[in-house]
Image: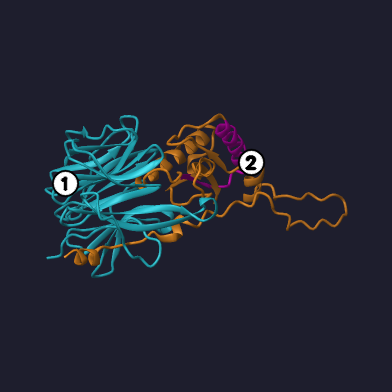
Amino acid sequence: MRMKYLSLCAALALVAACSSTPEKKAEVATGGTTTTTAPAPAPKPTGPVPGSKEDFVVNVGDRVFFGYDKFDLTPEATATLDKQAAWLKKYGSVTITIEGHADERGTREYNLALGERRANAVKNYLTALGVDLARVQVISYGKERPAVLGSNEAAWAQNRRGVTVIN
Amino acid sequence: MLTPRFSPTAQEITYLSYFNNKPRVYIFNVDTGRQEVLGDFPGMTFAPRFSPDGNKVIMSLATNGNTDIYLLDLRTRRQTRLTDNPAIDTAPSFSPDGSKITFESDRGGSQQIYTMNADGTNVQRITFGAGKYGTPVWSPRGDLIAFTRINGGRFSIGVIRPDGSGERELSTGYLVEGPTWAPNGRVLMYFKEKPTGEGGRQRQVRLYSIDLTGRNERQMLTPTDASDPAWSPLIP
């Protein structure tokens, strides 16, 4: 009888795709040094092209972090978002998607809701600073896309984040 | 794709899909292979479950930083809002007679389990222990609600009576989550995730079942990691 039940059980799997492939880390360290071929031997401007995704990630900072089960913005977060808003106003044609993420120390559905709260906290701050609402979308991934895999507070703290992605 | 759940006939499955970067609740017909978005909502829908008669799906809508519970009638496609609270209200599950719904909410300051009538009235909190409680699932017998608890850095699976009495812990670990009931209401299945490898940076995620007595915990054989099991109803 029991085996009959078990055979009916849909072990529909989230599998490794969700739990063991951390989000590709933004290539902060390497930047984009591949583009410019200045003719002069003068010290050429290395680094990202102004207004590019790389410029945003390297020179502004694409993410803010939250406390455990929190969605209020810390002073560090608002400092980053101030810079994001200034950059977004400078490059007015860019549209963004704000991702809300949670650490793994919550249940799946609660974390989807929590990620949505975090993404909206970022959105509300940016739009209050004058970023046009029409340029902003939000999406929550809950705990499905950790930036860092680890079993300690240092890892979890990096996963409780709002990430502003340039579309 | 997340959180698959069977309809009472097991002919349909409802789930959350991130298709086109729009997280929405879908319904999938096992016979026809057809799938479609459920409802027309202005934001992310998730946490779906069927009503016991299979005619409705209950789910959460998250929009502008607030999550509430909605009911969608599959025949009329009418959407009814059941909770209206600035808190996170999610993970709804019907009682087997369809008269009540259990759900989780942080309206009291932390994630806890509540019950309400199927029309959204008569909300009662039923968990008061330390830590947080989520993922309530009503037993097919109606006598118990299974849940996930997070307390002191540990996760556990437990059961409690719908009136809030008789709480018992069945299994615990680094991360155990998402109970689902066997049709006889006497066995639960859930998933366990544990850190492996150097620095605990890898994960092993497997399905386990346990008797309601808290004994006889067994790992299900799955070809790879697996989570979020859904036990089908008895098929006539």
Residue holding disc 1 = B95
Residue A76 vertical position relative to residue B30 in the rendered view, above or below: above
Q: Secondary structure at mark 1?
A: loop
Q: Splitting the image into 4 quarters, where does residue A68 fall?
A: top left
Does residue B114 appear to the left or right of A124 in the view shown?
Answer: left
Q: Which chain is orange?
A: A
Does residue A7 appear to the left or right of A71 in the view shown?
Answer: left
Q: Chain of mark 1?
A: B
Residue at x 50% of width, y 44% of height: A159
Reply yes or no: does residue A88 show up in magenta: yes
Q: Which chain is cyan?
A: B
Q: Chain of mark 2?
A: A
Does label 2 lie on the same chain as label 1?
Answer: no
Does residue A2 appear to the left or right of B59 in the view shown?
Answer: left
Q: Which residues are magenta?
A: A76-101
- Whether residue B20 appears in this view of the structure is yes
Residue holding disc 2 = A60
